[in-house]
Structures are given as C-alpha cells and as structure tokens.
Amino acid sequence: MAGEGAVLKKAREEKGLSYQEVEDSIKIRVRYLEALENENYGVLPGTTYTRGFLRTYAKHLGINPQEIIDSYNASLVKEVEPDIEPRLSPIPSNQVWFRPVVLAGMAILAVIIVGGIIFVSNLGNKSGTFHYTPTPLPAAPKASDQNTADSGTGQNTNTAGQEQNAGQPSQQPEQYEGIVAELTFTADCWVVVNVDGKQALSGTIPSGTIQTLQADKQIEFVSIGNAGGLSLKVNGHNVPPLGKTGDVLRSYIIDENKVKELAGS
C-alpha cells in the first residue's frame, strides 16, 4: 500500500462518518469507497476514474487532494515491472555449398529474363503482325440541319428548366420516431444507460466514441462517471452540459416531456 488509502480511512473515522453517509454526500458507491481505502484499485473502472474519485473523496474529508494523487501516482510507478530482454539464439551458419547453388540459380534466371525481353521486342517489331484500321470520323452536319436542330432545342429550353425546378423537393425538417439520443464522448466515461427499461450501455466508453440510442418512451442514464466528457443531443436538439470533468451524475432521464422542453428552449 502506498499510504493514500490509510490516510483517507483515518480522516473518515476521525470525522465519525460511515461509508453510507459519504456516498450520500459525494455520490460515490460504498464499494468504491472501500476499494479506495484498501487501495484495491482493480475494482475501479480505470485510472482516470480512480484519480477523480480520490480527488473528490479527499476534498470531502478536508485533505489536500494533490498529495493523495501524488501518492497514488507513485504507487503506479512502483508497480511497473522492467522489461526482460529475451536471450538471443545464435544464428546457425549456412553450409558452404549453399551460396554457389544460389548464385548459379540467379544467373540462369537472369539469362531467361533477358532472353524473354529480346524475344518480345523482336516480335513487336515485325511488320504485318498487327493490323489496325482506324474508325472513320462522322461527317459534319450541314448548315441547314444544324439551324433546324438549334431552333428545336431553343423551343424546349424553358419547358425543361421549368420541369427541373418543379422536380426539386423542398427541404423538410428531419423527423424522429420516438426518442433518439446521440452520445458523443469527448473523454473516457463510465456509463450505465437503460432504454425503455432495458440496459443498453454499461462500462467505460473511450474518448472519440459516438453512440446513437433510440427509445419509444424513455432513456435513463443510471450513472455517468466524468459527466464533463459526454455531449448529448436529443432529437436534433443539444442538451446543456451534464457536468464538469470528474463529476458523477445519476438518474438523468429523457422522456417526452424532456424532449418538448429541449425543443422549446
């Protein structure tokens, strides 16, 4: 243990706080609080969230967050194991007869290639081998025919333009069936999302990911870790920022009333 977990535990006990009381205040689950104090970081969803939870927990207990983060970072450096270079096996020496055989084979191949090039060149230079008859060009139209064609084309110009303009569809606003949410992750986020009561997303979503969810009645964000790293658009309307970097958001629900609210804003 690097010691940051013991510092957090001691501060919590001195303040007489239970795990449940801390969870109610900073919205970090009890099992994550226990993992932080025991430095059992494998339970947490990644180093980004671990640092965020440590910072939030330390602030709540009145401890300098940077000292806790520095202690955690030092423990990560100690856990990195040095790379062990594999032993190099000696390269077996080739037998003496191998090189002459290879050289002889390469010489024969070169002779064959040169001979083939010479044969193809001579074949192409022989007269009478290929016959090409150019296709005659079409005769130019007479002046009278050209004037007739131009006058006929001019009479139909306006009609064609009117038909082309009439065929262009007018732009209509995009229609959505039910509730369509577009999630853009600008940073790593740990999320749990239910669509119409069924779980659709769960786990850590990496930065740069774009997800689209569609529901008939409701989309519920059960939990969002690092809410500042998620941008949300619902039925084409931008949702205001859900929080700052490192914030944890719970039970954010999008239903028909929420869609109407976003459309009117």
Image (cartoon, rainbow, N blue to C red):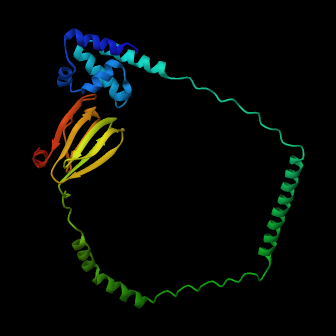
Which residue lies at the image location 25% right of the left edge and 35% below the top edge? 224
The relative height of residue 241 versus residue 129 in the rendered view (above or below) is above
Residue farthest top in this picture: 14
The location of residue 188, given as percent across then percent down, is 34, 35
Image check: 83 left or right of 125?
Answer: left
| Screen quadrant of the C terminus | top left
Q: Nearer the viewer, residue 132 or 222?
A: 222
> Of 35 and 243, which appears nearest the observer?
35
Residue depicted at 52% across the width and 86% down the height: 138
Note whether residue 202 is visible. Answer: yes
From the viewer's perspective, is residue 26 above or below residue 113?
A: above
Q: Residue at x 84, y 42 (%)?
A: 94
Q: Nearer the viewer, residue 99 or 75?
A: 75
Give the left or right position of residue 132, taking residue 140 as reference. right
161 vs 202, nearest the viewer: 202
Work out whether residue 243 can be spotted: no
Which quadrant would residue 110 be assigned to in this image? bottom right
Q: Quadrant of residue 221?
A: top left
Q: Position of residue 241 (x, y in %)?
A: 21, 36
Q: How many marks?
A: 0
The vertical placement of 152 against 3, above or below, is below
Query: How far across and how far down the image is residue 126, in percent?
Result: 80, 78
Q: Residue at x 72, y 81 (%)?
A: 130
On screen, residue 32 versus residue 82, left or right, reads: left
Q: Work out which quarter of the rendered image holds the N terminus and state it.
A: top left
- Is residue 71 depicted above or below 166 in this figure? above
**Which percent across, then down, holds residue 251?**
17, 37
